[in-house]
Image (spheres, rainbow, N blue to C red):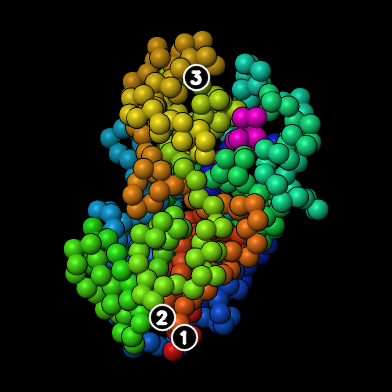
Amino acid sequence: MHSLQIDIQMNKRHFLKQSVLVSLGGMLIPSSILSSCTKKDSLEGATYKGKVLIIGAGAAGLYAGYILKSKGVDFEILEASSNYGGRLGKLTNFANFPIDLGAQWLHGKNSTVGDLVNNSNTKITLDDSDSKYWFNKKLLTQVPQNVNIFEGDNLPDISYKDYAIQNGLGNEYQYIVENIAGDQGASASKLSVFYNNLEEKNWSSGEDDFKFQETYYDLMDRQIASTVKDKISLSTIVKKIDYSQSTIIITDSNNKTHTADKVIITVPITILQSNDIQFIPSLPAEKTTAFSKIGMGPGMKVFLKFSSKFFDQNIIGGTVCAAYADESVGKSINDNVLLAFVMGNQADYLTSLGSDAAIANAILQELDTMYNGQATATFKAAHVQNYSTNPFIKGAYSYSTIGMGDARKIAAQSVDKKLFFGGEAMNINGHHQTVHGAVETGYREVVNVFNSI
């Protein structure tokens, strides 16, 4: 999850808990992963002789493959796009440091990914950067009213937008509230105050956010993906899963069939909501209804390079983009790159402009207003990463909707001991929206496969 570490934001890292580590073939696995498994045990000594097919080579799918390989299980990973990583990616040759196109903050160290960082001596830096707020057409170090109102007890199941209005935050706070909701992947009009707060209470990975000296993608590539690359079939779009017989038959867009005894599905929740994959027989109605109740809205990252650093480390409350961040924070060398982190309705608006040039220009105009024309005067290049228009992702990351109920738990349940569901949206421990949350589900579903025999 993206976080700007600002004092007005609710901070899920307040719910810090300690986790006991258990060993699996030399790998350290936090017990927080095991707490979501069907049976709370490790895979130590477990065996499985069948074939497992994993759909999706994002963090969850890659980690599931990593665990299966460690246990000597026959498996294959099918990935729709031409690259593995899902919502992880890397941009080079844009600045004098590598840039994360997708996830880029490590949210606490108390997780499997935190262990990977420690065990690999990966260099990370605490992100305690300062913020300015665009408020009443001025850049301020603080705003007059407290907007840290979205956590606590007895909260209603209404939107952040409506709750802000109920608590006396006027229209001048609109885009600051959009920033807070955007941090959770949603528009303020769609994120539930009650369910977001409820899910946040399970957060256990730590309070602080860290940035990578290289990239998040590099860590996952070297430590996880490199071990399973030979098992990944890229540009393989799954269109049908027939689990009506003992052997599951998976058909891709080229009409090629793949067979397996178990299938772990780790595609984004939007793909399941859009019925891009046909299931035979159809999935239970309760499950598809649960899919529909999990939110995942539009999102994009726009990187802008300038000849000089005129901007603040974080800028919050823009009408075009509610969250800007200095990309050089945590890097060993400094180029002048500003990230526009755009979610929800703002991402929809920018997408509607139709071209990357138009998107960059709209953001430059806003920055010119904030900084007296310095953005256009020093602008060098832009790169737009729009996850909304990626046909295999279709959005940013999952969020808690109004009336969501126990949708995540139902969505994550296996079907007929054959189909297993992972990915960040299927994390029921409060770590949805994160790489480490996706990784937890990859491990969980391997455990569930073994327990389903």
Residue named by callout 1: 452
Q: Quadrant of residue 177?
A: top right
Q: Nearer the viewer, residue 200 or 294?
A: 294
Q: Nearer the viewer, residue 109 or 287?
A: 287
- Judged from the image, the secondary structure of the residue bearing numbered disc 2 is loop
Label 2 vs label 3: CA separation?
51 Å
| Residue 199 picture location, percent across and down | 65, 58
Label of residue 366 in the image: 3
Query: Identity of the amino acid at label 1?
Result: Ser
| Residue 277 picture location, percent across and down | 35, 64
Q: Residue at x 70, y 47 (%)?
A: 158
Classify 10 Å Cα crowding around label 2: few (below 14), some (14-19), many (20 and above).
many
- Judged from the image, the secondary structure of the residue bearing numbered disc 3 is helix
190 sits left or right of 424 in the view: right
Q: Name the main secondary structure of what is drawn in magenta.
A: helix
Q: Going from the N terminus, do you reach mark 2 or mark 3 first?
A: 3
Q: Going from the N terminus, do you reach mark 3 or mark 1 first?
A: 3
Label of residue 116 in the image: none
Label tally = 3
The label nearer to you, 2 versus 3, is: 2
Residue named by callout 2: 418
411 sits left or right of 59 in the view: right
Query: Identity of the amino acid at label 2?
Result: Lys
Mark 1 and mark 2 residues within 8 Å of each other at the beta carbon: yes
Q: Is residue 41 magenta?
A: no
Q: Residue at x 76, y 50 (%)?
A: 156
Q: Residue at x 57, y 82 (%)?
A: 39
The residue range painted magenta reads 174-182
The label nearer to you, 1 versus 2, is: 2
- Judged from the image, the secondary structure of the residue bearing numbered disc 1 is loop
Classify 10 Å Cα crowding around label 3: few (below 14), some (14-19), many (20 and above).
some
